[in-house]
Amino acid sequence: METCDLGTITITGKATPVRSSSVSLPEAVAWFAGERHSHRPRCLSPVLLATSSVLSERLAHAKRQRLKQFVPGLAATSGDGLDRQRSLLAMDWLVRVHTPAWLRLVPSLNLAAACLAEGAPVLRVAEAAELIEAPLAAVRRASWGPWTSAPWHDHGISGADVSAAVSRALSALAADAAVAATLDIAGTFLPACGRMRLAIEQAVLIAACSHPWSSDSTTLDDHIAAVVAPTAHLLEDAVIELFSRLVDATPPADEGWLATHPADAARSAGPV
């Protein structure tokens, strides 16, 4: 069997039928480990398989190639006993990085975002479920005014149409790989994860209400995409960093996921 040369292969977004210089990330792992061509290599942990599949599919080509560096570490993770730690690490990232990033789209939610981001590591599913309730309530309080004056009301677009557009936009993002990474705790974490998603969708809806929009030149999906794009771009780099830590289940350093506490920045900005 030909040796896998990581310097010459290209990582694709989807599985390939045969081994060539272009393979998916799991297929590259199988090749590196000396396994037959497969998108589900035996040497790769279930959590990392789920995460790598979503991540490589949704990243743009250039960023996807950055994943090649993780192939050697991925190739011996099956049965290493670390999948639960990986899923808890992903849960912590979803609570303290992912959700606050979307809440910050709405200035009045900066402190709600900071309360999540500046907290201690979230190590239990019950704790994650409890922490999301206050931000979700804050989002609901903030949504009434913007929603009643939303720009699409005059164009016959229903709330269901807008919600569906937001859901489509968020479901296409690379950061959703972190949700896939919670596979090992999915049975208990799914309800809390759903409520996080609800808070995020409502924050995006509020931001979309305030974002200038002309239905004559921009479709609803393009309008939502423009609102989502800056945060989505920032989270791509963040989720790649998360992935690097999931490989050997290494938590972030003492300062947590972020170098500075966002609550300090929110307070220094004055009242919201």
Image (spheres, rainbow, N blue to C red):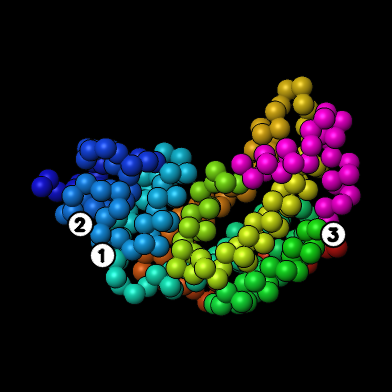
Instruction: Say which of 211 and 54 sits in front.
Output: 54
Was residue 149 drawn as part of the magenta stretch in this picture?
yes
Instruction: Say which of 114 and 142 sits in front.
Output: 142
Would residue 263 be visible to someone looking at this image? no
Q: Which residue is mark 3?
A: 141
Q: Is residue 182 left or right of residue 4?
A: right
Q: Which residue is mark 1?
A: 76
Image quarter of residue 80: bottom left
Which numbered disc, 1 or 3, marks the residue that appears first in the sequence? 1
Q: What residue lies at 46% left-to-right and 40% top-to-bottom? A: 60
Q: Position of residue 178 (x, y in %)?
A: 50, 58
Q: What residue lies at 51% left-to-right and 66% top-to-bottom? A: 186
Image quarter of residue 41: bottom left
C-alpha separation, residue under disc 2 versus residue under disc 3: 52 Å
Would residue 202 be visible to someone looking at this image? yes
At label 3, counting other C-alpha atoms closer than 10 Å, the crowd grade (few under 14, some 14-19, many 20 or more) is few
Which numbered disc, 2 or 3, marks the residue that appears first in the sequence? 2
Task: Please count the marks in the image.
Answer: 3
At label 1, counting other C-alpha atoms closer than 10 Å, the crowd grade (few under 14, some 14-19, many 20 or more) is some
Q: Is residue 242 left or right of residue 96?
A: left
The reply to whether dot 2 and dot 1 touch (C-beta < 8 Å) is yes
C-alpha separation, residue under disc 2 versus residue under disc 1: 8 Å
Q: What label sits on residue 33 in the rendered view?
A: 2
Residue that protrudes farthest toward the front in the picture:
187
Magenta span of residues? 142-168
Q: Is residue 247 left or right of residue 195?
A: left
Q: Amino acid at mark 3?
A: Arg
Q: Position of residue 33 (x, y in %)?
A: 20, 57
Q: Position of residue 132 (x, y in %)?
A: 69, 68
